[in-house]
Image: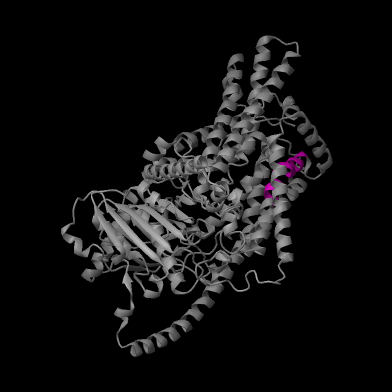
């Protein structure tokens, strides 16, 4: 596993790290790959900018004139107007996905490759520098801020343009004022729906957990969900205004119920739009933070109404209007179907145990081909607790801890985790009593892993890890990863690691024993300076049990055989099979729609808009399930065969390893204890009755030019930490500016290398100090989780008067 991760750090190592073989050797024939990489990037940027510009400038008359010419040139007898609109607004997304698969397959290490010069680039700074620290959007980087502004500008300018145009058009028509107001409301309502539909194009992209587009730009799912939240609020606001305009218009003429229950054959069907809007409003209301925090299960279950929302949207607007957003929805369907396949496997639990602090540790069996890094997280379902609830947990093990297992730590905070601990403790009690019972069996399914493609914790010489309570979980994986890599001579930049860990009770400090590398040899300690500072906030002095605080007092773990390892069928897995799945599903969708047009629509003279929308949706699903499902089945068989071969090789290697270990033991003469080195517990400094002072720590670290600060703490602490970083950075920038230091601008550019590349909360400070919150959500009570954020979207794009559809939309 460690060898598979080596491309992640090519040319990025330093400080005595090994140089990758063949990396950047003089005279190497790298011109052709470099040219191909440049061409692919150029094509992707060209497609994206053209597509985004077409959406942004669509309201203008020149753009609409160009679009009419496009439709005339691309309209085919088989696909008609639906094909032209799909080519204009949905095909670019699929082309981007296809090019992304080519890119990550042809350059498997490049899309996660971060060099020092990239850390100093303008694009990296824009992605990482926090513009807003605390506000309604949380911590917002420069690029995110630009994106928010662009969406707001687009909505305001588009609706202003449409409103002025509509008022001008109606003023030229000699009609009664009441009819004019009704018509104006209908047109403005239609425009709200159209703008909302364009915003919805981006709504489904962030929630495709294994999306190749997110992997390409290295935005992990837990970070992308915040974009889904923002877009969901914007989209639902537009669709609500869309429906409100029509409700007011119909009320003015006194036929509200009639219009709301109308299901037209030719034109927009109102009743499906009402159903879609009702489902969207229900998802929107339950996704609001106060509701989601207190009633998370209500939010989670109502969010499954996205199926009702999408299907009735297609029935509402018909196939040609629905095709505007079909591309993004199709990518989401691909991801959802693949996740369904992966989550069906019942995973073997190598060990399930309860630690003395009340934390549950689960160790799952995984195939060696399933790759992840120390910042990954997984979703876990336990059938004995719920068939619908999937909870996210940070991975607490390093990929270098072992090829065949992955572990997580779960803090008991709610009913789900309390029941899980109860099952494990019951089984442990039965084991101690010598009785066996099936009542305590654990049937677990796992989805993932997800997270950052790039191991950012390995790319900075100085690393500060700030954690609160169970938030130490991903940092345990980071510590183990760094120690193992240094021991084995792998690429690894960190030389100084400072851990600031705040806990409520001293018994939580036993979590440190979950690190696989409990002892640091002298060869590692010479290259790595590790300082673990623990703060116990609710105890003012050493407890009586201080002598055993650092010991692992967990009860013996239980083994649960469910029949298989974690499935490798994940979008972030095998690039070849993922690309084949995408290609087969896309071609299957196009073929299914063509056959439906020839043998169903034309043969039976289907003209109803809602009927055509249903056929279009079924063809999308058929393309994913049939040809895509066949590729997934072949993928599954390939993974199964590979796993059997790996097990055979592993058994042979284990036999040789045992023989070598026996010989080494006899030769060593029992001096292992002396050679073990320093324990992690000896590197831990514990303070009672106080909290870490971020500002003072950061001020002492400001002289380090290559520092990465990562936090896994409550939001309030993250905001404080980010604010301290920004304050320190501003103070130093101000002092340099006032001092007139020669070359200060260049020096500032040279030393500012870090940034924020994770979800939610981050900030930058000093000379290149990074604050990032890699928030793979941890195990906790549903009311506290921020995990599968929402997918609320709703938009009936309907027109009261069918005659105006063609002119008003196209």
Q: Residue shown at 29%/85% (left/top)?
A: 670
Q: Position of residue 689 (x, y in %)?
A: 23, 49
First to last magenta residue range: 81-95
Q: Position of residue 287 (x, y in %)?
A: 46, 38
- Furthest-left residue in view? 544
**Of the pair 741 and 271, the residue shown nearer to us:** 741
- Furthest-right residue in view? 73
* Quarter of the figure that contains the C terminus: top right
Q: What is the tally of numbered marks visible in this picture?
A: 0
* Residue 781 shows up from this direction: no
**Of the pair 276 and 600, the residue shown nearer to us:** 276
Residue 349 figure quarter: bottom left
Residue 70 figure quarter: top right
82 magenta-colored: yes
Q: Residue shown at 21%/69% (left/top)?
A: 433
Q: Position of residue 780 (x, y in %)?
A: 36, 50
From this view, report whether residue 577 is shown above or below residue 196: below
Q: Position of residue 374 (x, y in %)?
A: 46, 61
In screen coordinates, is 208 left or right of 802?
A: left
| Most frequent secondary structure within the magenta stretch | helix
Q: Residue shown at 55%/70% (left/top)?
A: 4
Q: Residue shown at 70%/23% (left/top)?
A: 801
516 magenta-colored: no
* Residue 76 shows up from this direction: yes
**Of the pair 601 and 481, the residue shown nearer to us:** 481
Which color mode does the image show? Answer: one colour
In screen coordinates, is 725 left or right of 38?
A: left
Residue 575 figure quarter: bottom right
In screen coordinates, is 472 left or right of 85?
A: left
From this view, report whether residue 652 is shown above or below residue 368: below
């Amino acid at each position: 596993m460690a060898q598979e991760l080596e491309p992640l750090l090519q040319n990025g190592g330093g400080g005595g790290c090994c140089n990758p073989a063949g990396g950047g050797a003089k005279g190497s024939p790298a011109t052709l790959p470099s040219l191909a990489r440049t061409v692919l990037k150029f094509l992707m940027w060209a497609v994206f900018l053209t597509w985004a510009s077409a959406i942004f400038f669509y309201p203008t008359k020149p753009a609409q004139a160009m679009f009419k010419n496009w439709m005339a040139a691309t309209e085919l007898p088989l696909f008609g107007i639906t094909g032209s609109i799909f080519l204009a607004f949905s095909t670019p997304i699929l082309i981007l996905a296809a090019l992304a698969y080519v890119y990550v397959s042809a350059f498997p290490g490049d899309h996660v490759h971060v060099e020092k010069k990239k850390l100093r680039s303008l694009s990296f700074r824009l992605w990482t520098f926090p513009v807003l620290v605390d506000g309604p959007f949380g911590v917002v980087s420069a690029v995110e801020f630009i994106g928010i502004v662009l969406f707001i500008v687009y909505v305001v300018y588009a609706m202003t343009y449409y409103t002025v145009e509509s008022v001008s058009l109606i003023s030229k028509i000699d009609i009664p004022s009441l009819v004019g107001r009704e018509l104006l409301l209908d047109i403005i309502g239609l425009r709200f729906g159209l703008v909302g539909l364009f915003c919805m194009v981006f709504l489904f992209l962030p929630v495709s957990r294994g999306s190749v587009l997110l992997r390409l730009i290295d935005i992990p799912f837990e970070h992308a969900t915040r974009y889904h939240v923002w877009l969901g609020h914007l989209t639902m606001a537009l669709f609500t205004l869309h429906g409100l305009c029509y409700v007011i218009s119909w009320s003015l003429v006194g036929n509200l119920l009639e219009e709301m229950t109308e299901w037209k054959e030719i034109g927009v069907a109102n009743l499906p739009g009402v159903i879609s809007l009702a489902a969207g409003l229900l998802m929107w209301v339950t996704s609001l933070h106060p509701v989601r925090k207190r009633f998370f299960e209500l939010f989670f279950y109502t969010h499954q109404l996205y199926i009702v929302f999408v299907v009735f949207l297609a029935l509402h607007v018909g196939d040609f209007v629905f095709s505007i957003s079909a591309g993004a929805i199709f990518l989401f369907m691909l991801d959802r179907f693949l996740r369904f396949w992966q989550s069906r496997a019942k995973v073997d639990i190598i060990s399930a145990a309860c630690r003395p602090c009340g934390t549950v540790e689960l160790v799952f069996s995984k195939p060696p081909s399933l790759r992840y890094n120390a910042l990954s997280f997984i979703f876990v379902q336990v059938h004995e607790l719920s068939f619908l609830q999937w909870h996210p947990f940070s991975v607490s093990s390093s990929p270098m801890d072992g090829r065949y297992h992955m572990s997580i730590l779960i803090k008991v905070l709610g009913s789900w985790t309390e029941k899980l601990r109860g099952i494990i403790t019951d089984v442990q009690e039965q084991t101690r009593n010598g009785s066996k019972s099936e009542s305590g069996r654990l049937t677990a399914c796992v989805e993932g892993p997800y997270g950052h493609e790039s191991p950012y914790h390995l790319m900075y010489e100085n690393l500060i890890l700030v954690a609160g309570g169970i938030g130490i979980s991903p940092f345990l994986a980071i510590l183990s990863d760094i120690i193992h890599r240094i021991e084995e001579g792998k690429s690894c930049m960190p030389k100084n690691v400072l851990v600031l860990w705040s806990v409520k009770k001293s018994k939580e400090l036993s979590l440190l024993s979950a690190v696989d590398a409990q002892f640091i040899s002298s060869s590692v300690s010479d290259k790595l300076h590790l300082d673990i500072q623990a703060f116990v906030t609710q105890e003012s002095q050493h407890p009586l049990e201080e002598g055993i605080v650092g010991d692992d007092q967990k009860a013996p773990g239980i083994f649960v055989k469910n029949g298989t390892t974690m499935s490798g069928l994940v979008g972030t897995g095998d690039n070849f099979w993922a690309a084949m799945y995408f290609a087969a599903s896309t071609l299957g969708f196009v073929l299914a729609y063509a056959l439906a047009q020839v043998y169903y629509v034309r043969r039976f003279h289907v003209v109803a808009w809602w009927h055509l929308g249903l056929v279009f949706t079924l063809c999308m699903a058929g393309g994913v399930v049939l040809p895509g499902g066949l590729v997934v089945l072949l993928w599954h068989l390939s993974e199964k065969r590979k796993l059997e071969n790996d097990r055979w090789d592993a058994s042979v290697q284990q036999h040789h390893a045992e023989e070598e270990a026996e010989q080494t033991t006899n030769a060593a003469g029992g001096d292992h204890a002396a050679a073990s080195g320093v324990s992690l517990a000896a590197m831990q400094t514990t303070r009672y009755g106080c909290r870490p002072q971020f500002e003072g720590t950061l001020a002492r670290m400001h002289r380090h030019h290559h520092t990465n600060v990562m936090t896994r703490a409550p939001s309030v602490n993250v905001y404080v930490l980010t604010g301290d970083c920004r304050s320190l950075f501003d103070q130093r920038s101000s002092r340099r500016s006032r001092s007139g230091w020669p070359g200060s601008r260049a020096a500032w550019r040279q030393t500012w290398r870090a940034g924020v590349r994770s979800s939610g909360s981050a900030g930058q400070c000093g000379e290149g100090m990074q604050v990032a919150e890699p928030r793979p959500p941890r195990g906790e009570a549903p009311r506290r989780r921020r995990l599968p954020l929402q997918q609320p979207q709703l938009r009936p794009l309907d027109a009261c008067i069918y005659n105006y559809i063609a002119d008003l939309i196209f």
